[in-house]
Amino acid sequence: MSIPPVNLVIRKINITDLPYLEWEGEFAHFRRLYHEVYTQSLTRKAVMWLAEDPSHHLMGQLFIQLKTRRVDLADGRYRAYLFGFRVKPEYQNQGVGRQMLLKAEQDLIHRRFRRVCLNVIQTNPRARQFYQRYGYQVLGSDAGIWNYQDNDGLWHNMEEPAWRMEKELVQSISLMK
Ligand SMILES: CC(C)(COP(=O)(O)OP(=O)(O)OC[C@H]1O[C@@H](n2cnc3c(N)ncnc32)[C@H](O)[C@@H]1OP(=O)(O)O)[C@@H](O)C(=O)NCCC(=O)NCCS
């Protein structure tokens, strides 16, 4: 049985939205990370998107890094990096992720970016298929080493082997014509 697409609004995140990104505590450990990305969004180094239902319940989130020292990921001009993309389980498989991805890509096209890349964890083949369906190609693997400071100030060193995927945005415009 096909589930009808849900009504949703996709918009940029405000500072008052940040607590909701913690999903009732499940992602409280990313509180500092979210604040850091939000601060970067104020200087146009990042964009934070959310999807919400008509009652303003958070459905999902997606972040774009426009500029970072890691120019292989985001160089501030041509190449952007997609991360922190997740849709709440109760809203998955209803087209929310697809609409969020399209919105983020359209915004990048407006900013004249040409490529968007991302890391998808190798233990997540469904997400890899999802991106492939929308034109992302696997370029290779990435050790997926990164760290973050949790809400108690403790540092966590992560190692999440990933596939590096990339999509040419200019090409996708010509395909749409
Ligand atoms: C990956 C993720 C963001 C996709 O979001 P989503 O809202 O579920 O995505 P969509 O609904 O647009 O598409 C997902 C599936 O639903 C199907 N679908 C899309 N619209 C549909 C509709 N109206 N009715 C029924 N099915 C639909 C798609 O064909 C797709 O099929 P698949 O299961 O074979 O991939 C989400 O599944 C998620 O948060 N997963 C956990 C976190 C994660 O893996 N994040 C990615 C990290 S890189």
Image (tube, grey):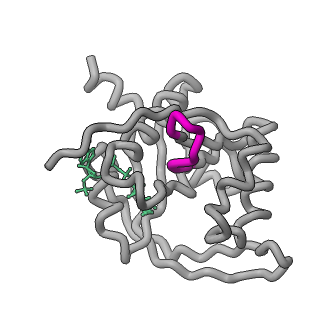
Farthest top residue in view? 177
Q: Residue 119 or 124: which is nearer the viewer?
A: 124
Query: At 80% across and 37% down in the image, what residue appears?
Result: 43
Q: Is residue 151 magenta?
A: no
* Residue 80 location (% of width, % of height): 56, 44
Quadrant for residue 154, please give it: bottom right
Query: At 48% across and 44% down in the image, what residue appears?
Result: 116
Q: Residue 87 or 140: which is nearer the viewer?
A: 87
Q: Is residue 80 above or below residue 92?
A: above
Q: Is residue 12 left or right of residue 5?
A: right
Quadrant for residue 152, please give it: bottom right
Q: Is residue 68 left or right of residue 138?
A: right
Label tally: 0
Q: Residue 14 or 73: which is nearer the viewer?
A: 14
Farthest left residue in view? 1
* Residue 31 location (% of width, % of height): 75, 63
Position of the C terminus by quadrant: top left
Q: Which region is colored magenta?
A: 53-62
Q: Is residue 34 above or below residue 44?
A: below
* Residue 57 location (% of width, % of height): 57, 45
Quadrant for residue 83, please give it: bottom right
Farthest front residue in view? 55
Q: Is residue 115 left or right of residue 156?
A: left
Query: At 26% across and 38% down in the image, what residue appears?
Result: 4
* Residue 62 location (% of width, % of height): 55, 48
Q: Residue 16 or 35: which is nearer the viewer?
A: 16
Q: Is residue 140 above or below residue 16?
A: below
Q: Is residue 58 magenta?
A: yes
